[in-house]
Image (spheres, grey):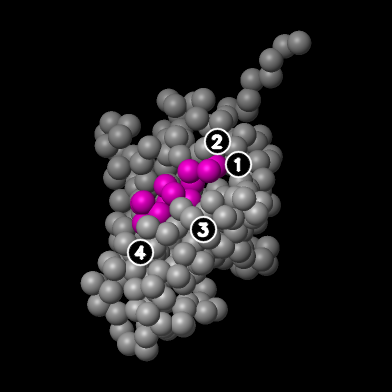
Amino acid sequence: MKILLFDLDGTLVRAGGAGRKALNRAVQNVFRVKKDCGELGLAGKTDLVNFGEAIANAVGRRPTRRDVDRVHEEYIRILPRFVRTARREKRYELTRGVARLLKVLAARPDEVALGLGTGNMERGARIKLEPSGLNGYFPWGGYGSDAYHRHLLLKKAVARAKKHHRLRRVDPADVFVIGDTPLDVAAGKKAGYRTVAVGTGFATWEQLRRSRPDFLAKDFRNVEAWLSWLSLKPETRKKR
């Protein structure tokens, strides 16, 4: 069975900056400051890393775990509002071709297991995905609430896949980490899995190419190419 671990932001959906805006507001609300995470790069990192860096940038000291927990609680409270605003202003969108590819893959439950491998904490991930209608494709995953480092949450995702699908063993060569940044690729490689970089998000094509993923795609529209990369049989064409 092939195990596919999808990153969220920039890979499955583009949420119009809802996560960054909610994090900024959460830090401001919790610490009563005007500063925020500024120009910090959030893509490809875990929420534990991003929350800590945002707090340090705003208050000028190393955050405690209690600080991070308080910001996370506030972030989860206000995130739905920012996601709704992004959707209303038409800044929330699915990435190109992802809905069809997921439908095709989900129709092969004996061959493919679909999961999340995202730096978002689980509650935040589900909130961001809710308007997309994609949550149902991903009954399990690895999240930023599981680990500080991306490669470890990917390991957790595979452990959950193994339990959910009652697999006796998992060959690392059958695990594919799919993301839109070089950090996604690096995490997948460090975990010992195969990597697919997609040009749907926050990195340039050259940055993705230089990260040396096993496969490189502009988006998800070429379903046959994806099936070939995954060593799956091509779609059966219906006779007219």
Label 1 neighbourhood size at 10 Å, few (<14), some (14-19), many (20+)? some
Q: Kindly tell me whether residue 149 is visible in this rendering.
A: no
Look at the numbered discs 1 and 2 and tell me whether their residues touch, using CB distance below 8 Å: yes
> Which residue sits furthest right?
240
Who comes first in sequence, dot 2 or dot 3? 3
At 54% from the left edge and 51% from the top edge, which residue is drawn? 84
Amino acid carrying mark 2 in the image:
Leu
Q: CA distance from mark 4 to mark 3?
A: 13 Å
Q: Which residues are magenta?
A: 118-132
Q: Which residue is mark 2?
A: 102
Who comes first in sequence, dot 4 or dot 1? 4
Q: Which residue is mark 1?
A: 98
Label 4 neighbourhood size at 10 Å, few (<14), some (14-19), many (20+)? some
Q: Which residue is mark 4?
A: 74
Who comes first in sequence, dot 4 or dot 2? 4
> Dot 2 lies on which element?
helix
Kindly indicate the quadrant of the structure image that contains residue 191: bottom left
71 left or right, relative to 81: left
Count of numbered tags: 4
> Dot 4 lies on which element?
helix
Kindly indicate the quadrant of the structure image that contains residue 68: bottom left
At 56% from the left edge and 62% from the top edge, which residue is drawn? 17
Percent of width and height locating residue 51 = 38, 71
Q: CA distance from mark 2 to mark 3?
A: 26 Å
Task: Determine which of the numbered discs, if any, sits on residue 82 in the image.
Answer: 3
Q: CA distance from mark 3 to mark 1?
A: 23 Å
Amino acid carrying mark 3 in the image:
Phe
Amino acid carrying mark 4 in the image:
Glu
Percent of width and height locating residue 148 = 32, 66
177 left or right, relative to 89: left
